[in-house]
Amino acid sequence: MSRGYNFAAGPAAVPEAVLRQAQAELLDWGQARASVMEISHRGKLFAELAAESECDLRSLLDIPGNYKVLFLQGGATQHFAQIPMNFARRDRIADYVVTGHWGEKAVREAWTLADVRIAANSDASRHTAIPARDTWTLHADAAYVHYTPNETIHGVEFQHVPDVGNVPLVADMSSDILSRPLDVRKFGLIYAGAQKNIGASGLVVMIVREDLLERCPKDLPKIFNYAEHAANDSMLNTPNTFGWYLASLVFKWLLGEGGLVAIGERNRAKAEHLYAGIDGSGGFYRNPVEPASRSWMNVPFTLFDEELNALFLKESEAAGLLALKGHKAVGGMRASLYNAVTLEAVHALADFMRDFAKRYG
Amino acid sequence: MSRGYNFAAGPAAVPEAVLRQAQAELLDWGQARASVMEISHRGKLFAELAAESECDLRSLLDIPGNYKVLFLQGGATQHFAQIPMNFARRDRIADYVVTGHWGEKAVREAWTLADVRIAANSDASRHTAIPARDTWTLHADAAYVHYTPNETIHGVEFQHVPDVGNVPLVADMSSDILSRPLDVRKFGLIYAGAQKNIGASGLVVMIVREDLLERCPKDLPKIFNYAEHAANDSMLNTPNTFGWYLASLVFKWLLGEGGLVAIGERNRAKAEHLYAGIDGSGGFYRNPVEPASRSWMNVPFTLFDEELNALFLKESEAAGLLALKGHKAVGGMRASLYNAVTLEAVHALADFMRDFAKRYG
C-alpha cells in the first residue's frame, strides 16, 4: 500500500517529514544508543528534549513568561473533569459556552464538580453558528469561562477570541491549537489533546497562567493537581515520552514551515478552496454552517442525495482520499484539514468532488 | 551511534524486533495507507488491533472470562489515586503492604481517599526483604489489599502471590507483569504502566475482576470510573493508540518467544547469572537484598569502594552497557533485566563486571 491523503478527524494526519524523521531514528536516537522511548525521562538527554520542545512551543505561540507549559496525559476528556477540580470546586460558578459536542461533554463532566452555568448554547441552531457575544450570560464572580474554539463534529470555529473581562478564559483548543497565530495573553488556560495538530494521541499540552495555579486545592490527589505538575516540570509521573518527542518534532516542523503566520495563511487557503468548491457545486454539496462561523479545521458537508453517500465514500477511498465519513451526529461527510494536511491534498479532494458531482449530479 | 545494551529502569528496553517492525510500518501500517497513529481509534482497523491485542494478552496470562482488560492512561501513579476512588472511598479500610518506594507512593496518594492501613512495611530493613506473610495485619472487611510485587528501586520481589483470603488483592505490577507465568485468578485487580515490560510510557494495562466494577461509585467523574472505561472498551476517551499498538507488537513477540513459561525461564537465567557474578566477586560487588526476596527484574548493587562508582559508569557506558546508575535512594548501580533485555546483554554485563573487578579489586 502507499500513503493516501488523510482527512481523519483525530487521531489525524502527522506531517510526513515528522514521520520520516521518527522512522529514521526509531531504534537509535541522537546520542542515546537507544530509541527515544527506551530512555529515562529524568536523564540528561530527555531533559534536553523536554526543555527544547517547550522553548519551541513558546516561540511558536509567543507564550509570555508568566504562563507555564505542561505536558500531561488523559486526553482533553480527563481535563474536562480536572479543570473544575482544580479551579472551581462545588461552590464556585463556572460559565460554559456550548457550541457543539465537545463543549457539551465538558459540561457533562463538570456538572457535579462545580456550579456550572450555561452562558450560551447554540443547540437551537444545531450548532451551525457561534452565538453572538452580546447574548451570553456571564458571571463576574465565575471561577472561569470555558469554551471550545473549534468544534470538530459541527465544523464551527470562533474567528476571534471572545472578551470575557477579568474572568479567566479557559479553552479546549484540541482541534485548532497551532493552526494560526494566537494571543495567549487573552487566556487563563489553554489545553489540547495532541492527536490533531500536535502529534499522536495520549498527550495533552496545557498552557496555564501562573497565578491560577495558586488556586489548585491542596487536598486534591497530587496527580490531579496542576500546580504539582507545574512544580515538577510535568514529571510528577512518567510522561508519555514518545508522544512528547513527536510533539517536539512537530514544533520544529512548524518553525521550519515559517511559524503560525505562514501556517495560518496556508490553513485559510485550504479551507477557502474547499468551501468554494462546496458553495460552487450548485447544491450538489452543502455545508450547513453560517459562513462567519465556518471552521478552517473541519469541514462537514452533505450530498444533495444521501443515497450517494456510500458511493462517494467508496470512490473517494479508491482515489486515496481517506477518512471522509462524517460523524453520525451530523451525517454526510467531513474533511479535516489540520496542519499536516497539505494544500495538494485539499486540491485533490476538491478536484475529486467536482468530478464526482459532474458524474452523478 | 549504534544501539547499546540497555539496562534502564523505565522507560526501558523494547524488544528490537518490535522496534524494527514499528519502524518498517511507521508511515504505512497494514491496510491503513497511513501510520497507525494517524487513524481513528473507532475505525475498523484500530478496533481489530485492539481486539487482537486483548486476545493475545488473555492468551499470554490465561485471563479468565470474568476479568476485563483495560488500556488506560496516566501511569501507575494516577491509578494510585483512582483505585481508592473507585473501590474504597473515605469510609472503607484499604490495607497496604509496603515493600519499597512505589508502595509508599501508592499509600501517600491513597491516604486522603480511603481509610488506609499499613498491613506491613519493610522500611526497618530498608526494604531488603519481603515481610513474612504471618506478620501482616489484615482486615477481613477491607475493600482491598494493595501490594507491589516488584519494587524497582530496592530490587525486592515477591516470589509467590500472597494469600489474603476473600479480600480482593490489588497489585501494581508495573515492573514485573509478563515476566513469568501468573495465576490471575488470585487477584482482584492488576495494573501496570507499560514502560517496563509492555512497551512505551503513557499506557496503563489493567486487568480487573468484573464483580469489582459494580462497586465503582456512580458520582465519580466518568473519566475516573473504571466501570465506564470497561463499558466503553477503553474508548471512553481517545486512548494512546500508538502505545496500544506497541503493546500489541510486544504481546505478539512474547507469544513468538514461547509465552511466559519460556520468558520466565530466560528471566530466571538472566537474574541468576548476574547475582552469581555479584555474590562470587569476593565482596567487590554487593547486593543487599535477602536472597529469597531478590528481584528478577531489577538488580541493585554497590561497589566495595564508592570512589570507583564514577569510573565504573564511565567504563561501562564506553563498553555499550547503558543506564546502570543506581537510584539515589540506594546508591551504587542498578541493572534492570526486563523481558527485552537479552541473555547476551546480561552476559556482557557480567563479563564487564568481572573484568572491572579484576582491574580495580
Image (cartoon, coloured by chain):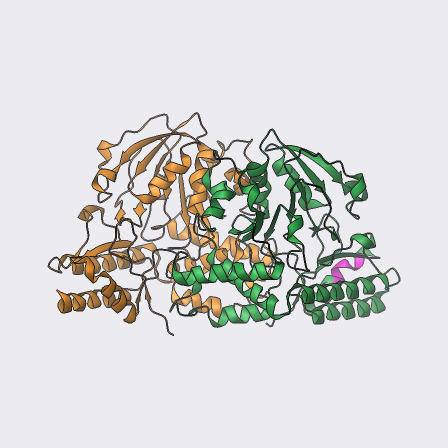
Chain colours: A orange, B green
Relative height, residue B142 to residue B200 (above, below): above
Left or right of A26 in this view: A191: left
Locate the N terminus of chain B by quadrant. Answer: bottom right
Q: How many marks?
A: 0
**Residue B74 visible in the picture:** yes
Q: Residue at x 20, y 68 (%)?
A: A351
The kind of secondary structure the magenta stretch mainly shows is helix
Relative height, residue A136 to residue A184 (above, below): above
Give the residues drawn in magenta, as a range: B307-312
Instruction: Name the residue at the front extreme.
Output: B65
How far across and how far down the image is residue B226, in percent?
51, 43
* Residue nearer the viewer, A4 or B69: B69
Locate the C terminus of chain B by quadrant. Answer: bottom right
Q: Residue at x 50, y 43 (%)?
A: B227
* Residue nearer the viewer, B15 or A58: B15
How far across and how far down the image is residue A78, in percent?
46, 43
Instruction: Name the residue at the left extreme.
Output: A282
